Image: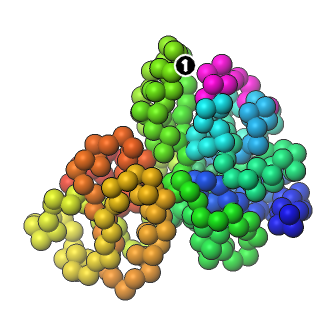
């Protein structure tokens, strides 16, 4: 494959490449190239305090990136890899402080995309890749999205992302799995996995103070985003400026969480380009309570300038 050969040349020369994954497109650099890692931060305009996720092509390779590999990671990787689940583990000497932003831990996952797996395999070592968007902006779910934002970057086209939002990030604390960032591998799925394997583990959400990606505002479109419950009317007295609510580009979250996640970022980009003053995304009460929507609601509350009810913004 010509695009993989070209990508390998760029990575080995300290450049960055747009890579397809099942979640969102990544902006990759070789973990062996300091210049490549620096170029990721420079291209994204990302501050150095926000650590990168390392992408591997096998569980065996993942083990070389960390100094501890809890036995549960064997079972988790067998079940969920390749796929949208990232482990936070103590890092090995292969992982520079730049990649981990000075933390002693590293985020690792094996993405589910045949071209990217082949790229890592042929390169012979892992790549570090954040989502391929400018810092705090909407993540890309197609090669065109990446090309529009970074015209100078070579992008491997792997088609549209089938998951559509970033991976679930988990860490471990004794017999607890901590969900640092919710995603389409849900709390329920992890609990079912524990039951099936008869493991003595529990799962809980944990907003990680050491995961700087959990900044309040992230995933943001250019126009203000109003995130609201369908049952709340915008004509009531809210803190939303009147000129915004007069001219809105709207979307109701699909009832099916798989579809909602897959369409989310593409829709945000589309609505951002309309001639409206603001974007409005509506959800139903039951979606807010549904574990399958936890990742989607998490991204939307971080992307939103206004939420109705207002308390929703405190949840993220
Ligand atoms: O699905 C995904 O995870 C995508 C694709 C490209 O794989 N990647 C992605 O990367 O979402 P990014 O950089 O947009 O988000 C990575 C986030 C960081 O902002 C941080 O919150 C968390 O992962 N993270 C990375 N390393 C960490 C660490 N050592 N400890 C805690 N959190 C970490
Ligand atoms: Mg990101």
127 in relation to 234, above or below: above
* Residue 313 visible to the viewer: yes
Quarter of the N terminus within the rendering: bottom right
Residue sitting at the far left:
236
Question: Coloring scheme of the render?
Answer: rainbow
Q: Residue at x 87, y 67 (%)?
A: 2
Q: Specify the quadrant of the image occupied by residue 74.
A: top right
Q: Is residue 260 left or right of residue 255?
A: right
Q: Which residue is mark 1?
A: 197
Q: Residue at x 67, y 47 (%)?
A: 111
Q: Is residue 139 magenta?
A: no
* Number of residues whose C-alpha sits closer than 10 Å to that of mark 1, classed few (under 14), some (14–19) or many (20 or more): few
**Relative image position of residue 214 (x, y in whole percent):** 48, 46
Q: Is residue 193 left or right of residue 112?
A: left
Q: Specify the quadrant of the image occupied by residue 55.
A: top right
The local secondary structure at tag 1 comes to loop
157 in relation to 185, above or below: below
**Relative image position of residue 292 (x, y in whole percent):** 39, 44
Residue sitting at the far bottom:
275
Q: Specify the quadrant of the image occupied by residue 253.
A: bottom left
Q: Residue at x 56, y 57 (%)?
A: 162
**Relative image position of residue 110 (x, y in whole percent):** 69, 42
Magenta-tinted stretch: 64-76
Beta carbon of the mark 1 residue lies under 8 A of ligand 1: no
Residue placed most toward the observer, 229 or 308? 229
Q: Is residue 158 left or right of residue 84?
A: right
**Relative image position of residue 101 (x, y in whole percent):** 65, 43
């Amino acid at each position: 494959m010509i695009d993989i050969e070209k990508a390998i040349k760029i990575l080995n020369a300290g450049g960055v490449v747009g890579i397809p994954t099942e979640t969102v497109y990544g902006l990759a650099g070789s973990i062996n190239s300091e210049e490549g890692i620096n170029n990721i931060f420079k291209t994204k305009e990302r501050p150095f305090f926000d650590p990168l996720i390392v992408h591997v092509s096998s569980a065996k390779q993942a083990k070389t990136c960390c100094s501890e590999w809890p036995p549960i990671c064997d079972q988790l990787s067998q079940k969920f890899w390749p796929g949208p689940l990232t482990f936070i583990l103590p890092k090995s000497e292969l992982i520079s402080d730049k990649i981990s932003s000075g933390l002693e831990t590293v985020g690792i996952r094996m993405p589910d995309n045949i071209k990217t797996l082949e790229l890592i395999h042929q390169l012979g070592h892992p790549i570090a890749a954040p989502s391929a968007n400018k810092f705090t902006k909407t993540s890309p779910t197609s090669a065109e999205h990446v090309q529009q934002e970074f015209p100078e970057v070579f992008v491997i086209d792997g088609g549209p992302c089938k998951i559509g939002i970033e991976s679930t990030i988990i860490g471990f604390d004794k017999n607890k799995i901590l969900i640092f960032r919710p995603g389409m591998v849900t709390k329920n799925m992890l609990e079912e996995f524990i039951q099936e394997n008869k493991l003595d583990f529990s799962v809980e959400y944990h907003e990680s103070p050491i995961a700087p990606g959990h900044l309040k505002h992230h995933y943001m479109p250019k126009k203000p985003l109003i995130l609201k419950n369908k049952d709340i009317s915008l004509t009531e007295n809210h803190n939303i400026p009147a000129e915004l609510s007069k001219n809105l580009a709207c979307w109701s979250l699909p009832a099916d969480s798989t579809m909602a996640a897959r369409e989310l970022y593409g829709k945000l980009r589309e609505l951002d380009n309309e001639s409206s003053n603001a974007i409005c995304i509506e959800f139903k009460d039951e979606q807010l309570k549904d574990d399958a929507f936890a990742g989607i609601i998490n991204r939307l509350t971080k992307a939103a300038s206004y939420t109705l009810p207002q308390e929703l913004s405190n949840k993220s």
